[in-house]
Image (cartoon, rainbow, N blue to C red):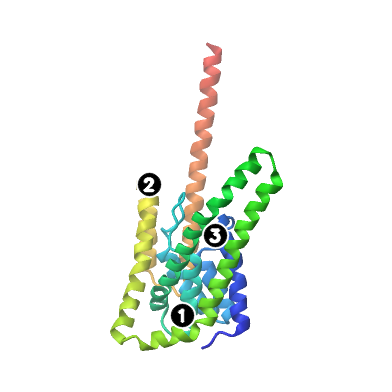
């Protein structure tokens, strides 16, 4: 299938919004699960967007910016995984793997912006010293507008202008290489989830991980809603237990303080 000009413009506008969100880390709508879903809506295939978004989100689960580091860009990965699947007919796994070069491209573009924007900092520091709020505001707006424009232009060029070239390239790939991309795309979500667990997993959370693993792998459900409900129930259970523990600890502290005052 082909992407029309209006769809290309819609993808560019969407990329501007989610790209700014990634730049500011405001609402976290830049995550692939959301970006891919929005891309699917724009292209008229919501199911494709959801499937590609789920796989890409798992692959990028452990990749988040920390300090000055910049991971592979989740926005381009989310958009292009759906775009490639839409125009080439490839599966979600292979499309996600084929979208990684675009993610790396935007990663280096953002790193270049980090370096370039350092030239703006001298003026921003001077404005801050002089309590020039408008000057600081202007610097931030200029940098944000540049980032927004880059996201819009790159997504439009990659998704609309280069769609014929991408389709021809994928059709030229031999079957064994395409299958390799499918295998890689199937492995990457497990790698991403493992990276996330390495950071977040604690001993006290292991029972919940095992419960979720058993429910997801050994019980037959027609959809994931029952698993989500169990997850919410466990989260509420932990929240209530920790709340009671905190209340008891606070009460104990008050009693000890009263006892000390009495002495």
Label 1: which secondary element: helix
Of residues 141 and 15, the one drawn nearer to the viewer in this rendering: 141
Q: Residue at x 37, y 55 (%)?
A: 197
Q: Considering only order in the chain, which callout, 2 or 1, is on the residue closer to the N terminus? A: 1
Q: Return the residue at label 3.
A: 22
Please provide percent x and percent y for residue 198. 35, 53
User: Which disc number belongs to residue 157?
Assistant: none
Question: For residue 34, which quarter of the picture?
Answer: bottom right
Dot 3: element: helix
Q: Earlier in the sequence, mark 3 or mark 1?
A: 3
- Relative to 98, does residue 244 appear above or below in the rendering? above
Which residue was labeled with disc 2?
A: 204
Q: CA distance from mark 1 to mark 2?
A: 41 Å
What element does badge 2 sit on?
helix
**Crowding at label 2, few (<14), some or many (≥20) Cα neighbours within 10 Å?**
few
Label 1, on which residue? 84
Q: Residue at x 55, y 13 (%)?
A: 262
Q: Residues within 10 Å of mark 3 (few under 14, many from 20)?
A: some
Q: Position of residue 116 (x, y in %)?
A: 52, 56
């Amino acid at each position: 299938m082909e992407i029309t000009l209006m769809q290309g413009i819609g993808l560019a506008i969407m990329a501007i919004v989610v790209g700014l969100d990634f730049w500011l880390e405001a609402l976290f709508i830049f995550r692939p699960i959301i970006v891919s879903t929005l891309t699917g809506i724009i292209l008229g295939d919501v199911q494709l967007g959801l499937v590609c978004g789920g796989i890409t989100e798992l692959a990028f689960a452990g990749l988040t910016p920390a300090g000055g580091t910049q991971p592979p860009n989740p926005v381009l990965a989310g958009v292009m995984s759906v775009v490639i699947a839409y125009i080439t007919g490839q599966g979600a796994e292979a499309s996600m793997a084929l979208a990684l070069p675009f993610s790396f491209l935007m990663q280096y573009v953002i790193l270049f912006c980090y370096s370039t924007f350092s030239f703006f900092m001298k003026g921003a520091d001077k404005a801050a010293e002089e309590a020039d709020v408008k000057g600081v505001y202007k610097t931030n707006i200029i940098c944000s507008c540049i980032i927004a424009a880059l996201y819009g232009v790159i997504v439009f060029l990659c998704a609309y202008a280069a769609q014929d070239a991408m389709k021809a390239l994928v059709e030229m790939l031999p079957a064994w290489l395409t299958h390799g991309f499918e295998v890689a795309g199937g492995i990457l979500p497990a790698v991403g989830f493992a990276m996330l667990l390495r950071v977040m997993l604690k001993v006290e959370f292991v029972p919940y991980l095992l419960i979720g693993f058993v429910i997801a792998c050994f019980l037959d459900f027609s959809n994931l809603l029952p698993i989500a409900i169990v997850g919410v129930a466990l989260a509420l259970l932990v929240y209530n237990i920790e709340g009671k523990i905190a209340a008891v600890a606070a009460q104990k502290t008050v009693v000890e303080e009263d006892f000390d005052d009495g002495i």
